[in-house]
Image (cartoon, grey):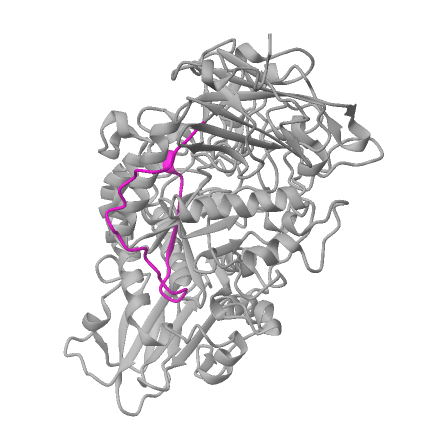
Amino acid sequence: MAIAADTQLRALAPASEVYTRQGEAHPLGASVQESGVNFSLYSKDATRVLLHLFEDADATCPSHTFELNPLRHKRGHYWFIFVCNIGHGQIYGFQVDGPWLPEKGLRFDKDKILIDPYSQAICFGNNYRRERAIGPGGNMDACMKSMVVDQLGFDWQGVPVPSHSLTETIIYEMHVGGFTKHPNSGVAADKRGTFAGVIEKIPYLKALGVTAVELLPVQQFDVSDAPDGHPNYWGYSPINFFSVHAGYSVDNDPLSAINEFKTMVRELHKADIEVILDVVFNHTAEGDEHGPTFCFKGLQNGAYYLVDKKNGQYRNYSGCGNTCNANHSVFRRMIIDALHFWVTEMRVDGFRFDLASVLARDSRGQPMKEPPLLWSIDSDPILCGTKIIAEAWDAAGLYQVGSFIGDRWNEWNGKFRDDVRAFWRGDNGYVSRFASRVLGSPDIYCGRQHSPHRSVNFICAHDGFTLNDLVSYSEKHNWANGENNQDGDNHNLSSNYGVEGPTELPEVEAMRHRQCKNMLATLYLSLGMPMLNMGDEVRRTQQGNNNAYCQDNEISWFDWSLVDKNQDLLRFVTLLGQIRRAEPTLDWNMHRSLSSVVENVNIRWHGVEPNKPDWSEHSHSLALTVYHPITQDELYVVCNAYWDPLAFTLPDRDSSEWHVVINTAKQSPDDIYPINQAPRYPHRTILASGRSMIVMIAKSVQQDEKYD
């Protein structure tokens, strides 16, 4: 039976007794104060709100229930109440009643337990069942619940926040769980797959030379939102935008996860490594009209989701059943509040916005020319020091690479991925496009006078083939996902080079290894901000699975035995990072617009003969020189995607000689040198093996060692 709030008199209540006061509408969520907790909830059309307090996550009935009186506990569209003598760690949930009018965007269900959209921790009992939140009937005995959190008390130890320029930034995209979950990770069993496990691998990340980690979703997600018998591994199924995913903590505890996450951030910052979060504001785990009711559906469905007013169905521009109504004033404020929370309380350094083009759609699903949310993020003073990266497309065909709003946004450059893959595979007609990608995609970005570093360049990411699989499989092999190999992208621009999957044929393996180096060198030496996919530096494989979102096993985990097996490739990538940071010809002024860079830096294109590039449909090779007007260094790069060797005549140099820094056709350690150890090359021509890349540099300081 619900207790009417404020019926107890404080003068008659013992100090330990739980009782209520009126409360305040601000701030939203559960805020800890000296004598208790204030709860505030938005619901414009609710007719009845109950607050339940629970003893623990497994509780099937509340210890206290308070019915909010709309005369005392509602102001405008906000319901609120203050509960005395409770605090940090208190478990709670809501029941909210109101009209069932799906065609008007209203889906109140008085029987469902709802979490607080501003929760900073979510707990799951052993009795949690996703299916119980679907359809008619109550789910109090099988629901997830919110927890009260007091964020005070963590010791940040005065560690300064890194602030790498876009020019200096090298991003490492990684899955928190998969990074250390493999039994051979060298991490203690209880720390594998956790934030604490990541801490143990910071020396590896530091040695690799990355300056930022981009973490796949760490906001609380529903592991059970996946095909039967599979977990949701990637985490693109958010439940709440303020809470840390408890499954990534050593104790699998929501409150422990907060401090463990903060500790990981602090230790990464000590190593001068930034933390970027992959955030999912385009859809939630509640799915479509056949999905569960966890929170937003049962509070004010139309404020949080795009709904077709003709039939009440959810508009689906995310490919995941629903689409968030990101430019509704309530949802827009919640997203901004969440971003502020992660920056101020959790001290992260930036965000990658999943399917960011969804956030440009209005309440009818139409793209907006001036989307309020995206402009708010772009201009927000709390976020002004962060990196903001857009996946500038959505699942319904809206593609905004090169046309995303604002000057501060960086963009995942999907065209870089596709054109670099196609060029090195040997496809016809890609020489010109490849050249543009190497220069920071001026065909995409010059028109808006963007910085060259607006482009986040990548060859592989979590979604799609790993680098090893890109050169080992011609087709996807997603049978383990249980969807009859129908899921995942069919357009991979991959090749197996003679054998599908693993092989011991030395000529096939040599070609695959060389192609990995070709694409990694292209990634690191191109203008723009490089992003390396977890494990590509040691040829991590997913056995041909290009959509391993539900594979929480060795298919997805980082196999640390590859660090020893492919030491030469790891060395190659590490030195690429050093070269990128050390060589002035690669450090083009990030404050210039891309068109200005291309105009002022002396770039010349070549073919097998200097100044004679072959831009024809059937050309598969290209060379260029980049001359730095201040240092007078010159870089010469040969990219031969042709299957046979080609002899390239070197451009003339008056005052210095060429030195070979990279030749991907050579065996380690002759495939790459630190710049100050690069051997002199005394000849007028150089032979580029089939499908190989050569990088040479001319400096005024002469080297003694010669290159054979």
For the magenta stretch, what is the residue range?
148-177
Residue 635's x, y, as percent?
A: 35, 77
Q: Tell me if 688 is positioned left or right of 658 in this view.
A: right
Percent of width and height locating residue 422: 53, 57
- Regarding residue 496, the answer to whether it shows in the image is no
In the rendered structure, the answer to whether residue 608 lies left or right of residue 130 reads: left
Q: How many marks?
A: 0
Comparing 266 with 213, the one in front is: 266
- 517 or 308, which is in the foreground? 308
Quadrant of res 530: bottom left
Front residue of 265 and 100? 100
Q: Quadrant of residue 164?
A: bottom left
Direction right: furthest residue: 310
Residue 169 in view of the camera? yes
Please identify the quadrant where the N terminus is shown: top right
Q: Which image quarter holds the C terminus?
A: bottom left
Residue that sits furthest to the front in the current view: 11
Where residue 603 appears, as percent x and y from the top left, is: 45, 81
Residue 244, x across and y down, in percent = 42, 34
Q: Main secondary structure of the magenta part?
A: loop
The answer to whether residue 610 is above or below residue 594 is below
Q: Nearer the viewer, residue 10 or 411?
A: 10
| In this rendering, position of residue 463 left or right of residue 392 | left
Q: Quadrant of residue 175?
A: top left
Is 645 one of the magenta-colored residues?
no
Q: Was residue 149 drawn as part of the magenta stretch in this picture?
A: yes
Q: Residue furthest bottom?
A: 654
Q: Residue at x 41, y 34 (%)?
A: 556
* Furthest residue in direction left, as rendered: 704
